[in-house]
Amino acid sequence: MFKTPLCDLFGIEYPIILGGMLWVGKADLTAAVSEAGGLGIMGAGGMRIDEIESEIAMIKEKTQKPFGVNIPLVRPDSEEMINTCIENGASIITTSSGSPKKFTRMIQGRGCRVIHVIANVKFAKKSEEAGVDAVAAEGYEAGGHNGHDEITTMALIPQVSSAVHIPVIAAGGISDGNGLVAALALGAQGVQMGTRFLATHESAAHEKYKHAVIQMADDETSVTGRTTIGPTRAIKNKLTDMIVDAEKGGATPEELFELIGEGRSIKACIEGDCEEGSMYCGQIGGHIKDLKSAKQVVEDVMTEAKSAITSLQAYL
Ligand SMILES: Cc1cc2nc3c(=O)[nH]c(=O)nc-3n(C[C@H](O)[C@H](O)[C@H](O)COP(=O)(O)O)c2cc1C
């Protein structure tokens, strides 16, 4: 059940993908999702080349199943990162924050698949033209960087699905089997989850950060960074208040970068500073009430999706 063409494309059992998450999605989480039958994508955005190599070696110790790596194309060494991933055994590369034209053919020429992350129809079409194997269409409710157009998953997925012929993966606001069924009904062939997998035992986020996710309410994320790094969704805290005040007060880009630099993610993720650190998180965090293993997340999503279909039949 729910074995979509996307599963065959990537050689996976279930159409569930771990979204790349810098600092959070390392070897343990990536391997756990792949081993559970989904597709683990490691977030390499904050890693040095030697770290990518050692994390991939750890993934391969834990699973023989396919896995991928997310490469944000804003990284100046993104080509070297991609080569390192391919040489070390990743079979899927997810590219984000840049043009899909740049590396798609090179990656595919070396036997790997490419997913490109997009947030509107225009970029979905450009990705298809560039030859990518699938697009991850990410709505505005997602954790981390959001599209400038602020299109929500509910509106984005049907429009992207109608506009392209390649498989669409729905991302943003999905944490359970009901979300999977909804995404498939809207035209997607699978889902990419970030926030749900952030709150798992295997995620590399600090325990305090994970607990902030399972304790938050639906209205407790904030989008900042529109004028600097682009809209970015995180759990509201002292830091997001400081950024909002600075943005309203006409702070210079330099002053703003001081508040939103990479060090802020490290502060939350590694040091567990949930006040002055940046805790990327999606709006669906308010729906997540427990820490689970990644395997449990995958199993629960599949069980819930089956019962969602049964419940819906009552309306027929
Ligand atoms: C903590 C965190 C870090 C993220 N880092 C990245 C990243 O490095 N690259 C990327 O393409 N997307 C990143 N994302 C987005 C996810 O890959 C995924 O598409 C998104 O979380 C899906 O929406 P959801 O949070 O509602 O599940 C991040 C999301 C979170 C929550």
Image (cartoon, rainbow, N blue to C red):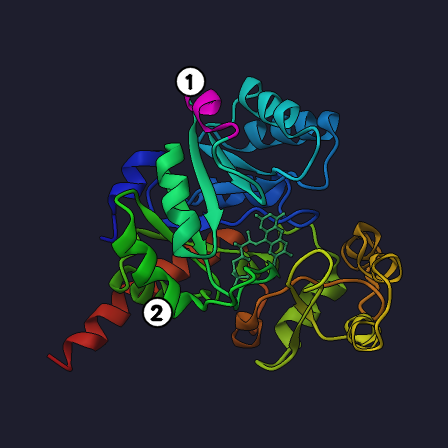
- Image quadrant in which the C terminus is located: bottom left
Image x and y of residue 109, in percent: 42, 18
Residue 290: name its quadrant: bottom right
Name the foreground residue: 170 vs 155: 155
* Residue under numbered circle 2: 178
Q: Earlier in the sequence, mark 2 or mark 1?
A: 1
Rendered image: mark on residue 109:
1
Mark 1 packing: few (<14 Cα in 10 Å), some, or many (20+)?
A: few
Residue 255 x/y as whole percent: 89, 61
Task: From the top left corner, tell me how far across and down residue 95 is, in percent.
Answer: 53, 39
Q: Could you say where residue 51 lies in the image, as x and y percent from the top left? A: 73, 30
The stretch in magenta equals 102-109
The residue drawn where x is 80% and y is 68% is 274
Observer able to see residue 217: yes
- Asked if residue 206 is among those painted magenta in the image, a careful observer would answer no
Looking at the image, residue 267 sits to the left or right of residue 199; the answer is: right
Seen at 71% across and 32% down, the residue is: 76
